[in-house]
Image (cartoon, rainbow, N blue to C red):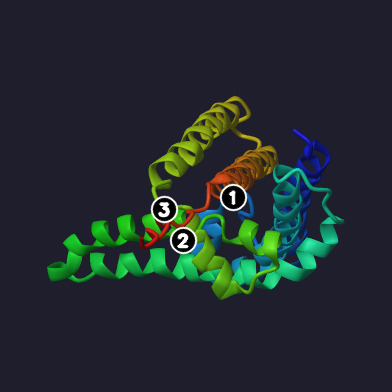
Amino acid sequence: MKSKEEAFIYLMTCAVGVGLYLLITIALGLPNAYDYSVIFKQHFWKAVFSILPGILLTAWFATGIDGIFTKHSLGLTPREITYYANHWFLRKIIIQILFICVFLFSFIFFFIPHLMLLAIPWILAAAWISLRLSVWLNASVDFDLSLTESLKRSFSLTEGQVFRLLILFCIPAFIISLFGQLFEKAISGHGMAILFSKSLFQGLTQIIVMAVCAAVYAEIKNKTERLPQETPEEKPAAETKE
């Protein structure tokens, strides 16, 4: 893997994000900082304010690493991580917020008895769309496309690739999640260590997802570029009149 250094930097950024969260919770005097469920129930907005800086920091670095992974997968020399992070960070945040809203909208159906059965089709449709649009950032970095154009290109390139992408995303995520849970059981009772381990395992999952997106994008792009162009059929020469 050509991007080992960037992957390591991202993991360290995840750890820094947890450190920021803990410092802010201490500054705000929030108890039970090690238990997200408790702190969000008791002090929702303060909890959001505490966790937001870490999320934005890791998202900024993730955007830069996405750009580097994309260039490496295409066999090109990438620019510095800050270039991709600064240019595509806002677009990445917009897409992530839209995806979160789409998935959260499904919970509305659970509170309406007559529409409860629509929640599952909605979630499946949202997952399908998210997979079809999963390489939008890679396409945008590759051709410096606008947000709309990159979404269109991702939707076009991933035609027939949904099941493959699902497998490539889910299997590593499941394995890492399993190891993460086993590790958390081994260190149970140490709240701070559990927080940092969760962050690192989630960061590792995100690295694999970014690497898969970049590799799949490069593979599909190379295949489409190698396809022979259709040549017009040769017309028979006109018969000469005797």
Task: Kindly identify the amino acid type of the residue bearing the numbered disc 1.
Answer: Glu
Query: Residue at position x 47%, y 43% from top?
Result: 165
Residue 98, horizontal then vertical, whole percent: 49, 71
Calculate the distance from the C-alpha at mark 2 to the C-alpha at mark 3.
7 Å
Q: Is residue 165 left or right of residue 216?
A: left
In this view, 60 is above or below 204:
below
Residue 83, horizontal then vertical, whole percent: 83, 64
Within 10 Å of the Cα at label 2, are there few (<14), some (14-19), or many (20+) other Cα atoms?
some
- Mark 1, residue position: 225
Secondary structure state at the residue bearing disc 2: helix
Task: Answer whether labels 2 and 3 touch (C-beta < 8 Å).
Answer: yes
Q: Is residue 114 left or right of residue 43?
A: left
- Mark 2, residue position: 155
- Mark 3, residue position: 159
Query: Residue at position x 80%, y 44% from top?
Result: 6
* N-terminal label among 1 and 3: 3
Nearest to viewer (mark 2 / mark 1): 1
In this view, 237 is above or below 222:
below
Task: Kindly identify the amino acid type of the residue bearing the numbered disc 3.
Answer: Glu
Viewer-side residue, 113 vs 31: 113
Viewer-side residue, 148 vs 53: 148
- Quarter placement of the C terminus: bottom left
Secondary structure state at the residue bearing disc 1: helix
Please tell me how many numbered marks the rendered image carries: 3
* Outermost residue toward the right in this view: 80
Q: Is residue 170 left or right of residue 137?
A: left
Query: Residue at position x 53%, y 35% from top?
Result: 177
Within 10 Å of the Cα at label 1, are there few (<14), some (14-19), or many (20+) other Cα atoms?
few
